[in-house]
């Protein structure tokens, strides 16, 4: 008999359903317990993101070899152009569509007041660097390793990559459903979840459609450019 495997999206949907259902019956101390976990996980995630960038981007660039500089310029150009396009598209969509949805479903003040309970304690885990610093560091190390071709430092970089991958698999990927469960548990307990869900579903649907459209456009542009300009 095959074991039923539930993907991350399925687990998130189950977490939302459980959060909405159990938030109606769970006592306040339980909700605060999950809020405490959410606060710690948020801090850990903020700490880990720069390390993930350095740990994954650096070896990827260094493994490209002598063409790393050219490929990096191409990647940065595509990424910057798509970011500007996505930002403009998101702003126009948000300015024209979202205000009507929020006003018809729930007031912004009601959404902002959905966190009336507080965690038992908080833990500050400041990141070693911000995201932009991590990106520049990863580009610098990756290009330097590609040019120098020193195996010792490359091995250290790949070992660090494996540490990051292990952290992602064992700590970051399994925990978002629990984090989302805590969010919806809190919103249900304070009585805001149903008005928020109405807006949430509509906005997520529009965001999903925009993401699909931008991804298709990015793949089409990148594929056409690479075919015309092989490295």
Image: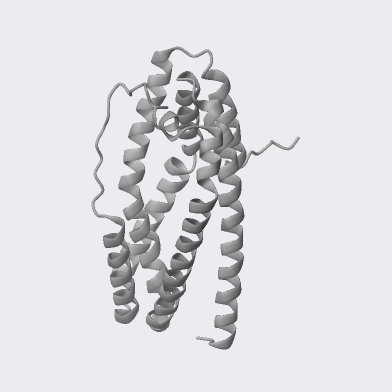
Nearest the eye: 65 or 49: 49
For this orientation, the residue located farthest to the right is 1
Residue 152 seen in the current view: no
Tell which of 141 and 187 is nearer to you.
187
Where 137 sits versus 37, above or below?
Answer: below
Residue 223 visible: yes
Whole-percent x, y for residue 92 in the image: 50, 58
Side (left or right) of 209 relative to 2: left
Percent from the top left, x then y, of residue 159? Answer: 36, 59
Q: How many marks?
A: 0
Q: Image quadrant for the N terminus?
A: top right
Residue visible at 33% across and 46% down?
46
Where is 73 relative to 49, above or below? below
Q: Tell me which residue sits at (52%, 32%) in the image.
A: 196
Quarter assignment of residue 197: top right
State the scheme by which the image is colored.
Answer: one colour
The residue at 56%/31% (across/down) is: 16
Q: Nearer the viewer, residue 170 or 190?
A: 190
Q: Position of residue 219 (x, y in %)?
A: 58, 70
Q: Residue at x 41, y 14 (%)?
A: 28
Vertical side of 162 occupied by 105: above or below: above
Q: Is residue 220 left or right of residue 72?
A: right
Measured as percent of width and height from the top left, residue 96 is found at: 53, 52
Q: Which of 92 and 78 lies nearest the eye of the viewer?
A: 92
């Amino acid at each position: 008999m095959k074991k039923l495997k539930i993907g991350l999206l399925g687990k998130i949907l189950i977490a939302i359903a459980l959060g909405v259902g159990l938030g109606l019956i769970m006592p306040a101390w339980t909700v605060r317990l999950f809020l405490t976990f959410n606060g710690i996980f948020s801090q850990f995630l903020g700490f880990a993101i720069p390390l993930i960038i350095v740990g994954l981007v650096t070896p990827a660039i260094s493994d490209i070899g002598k063409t790393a500089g050219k490929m990096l310029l191409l990647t940065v150009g595509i990424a910057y152009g798509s970011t500007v396009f996505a930002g403009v598209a998101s702003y126009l969509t948000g300015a024209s569509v979202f205000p009507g949805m929020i006003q018809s479903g729930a007031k912004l003040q009601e959404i902002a007041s959905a966190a009336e309970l507080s965690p038992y304690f908080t833990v500050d885990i400041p990141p070693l660097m911000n995201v932009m610093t991590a990106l520049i560091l990863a580009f610098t190390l990756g290009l330097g390793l590609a040019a120098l071709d020193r195996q010792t430092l490359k091995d250290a970089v790949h070992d660090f990559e494996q540490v990051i991958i292990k952290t992602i698999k064992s700590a970051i990927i399994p925990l978002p459903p629990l984090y989302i469960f805590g969010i919806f548990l809190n919103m249900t307990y304070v009585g805001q979840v149903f008005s928020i869900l109405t807006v949430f579903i509509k906005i997520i649907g529009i965001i999903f459609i925009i993401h699909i459209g931008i991804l298709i456009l990015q793949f089409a542009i990148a594929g056409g450019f690479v075919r015309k300009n092989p490295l």
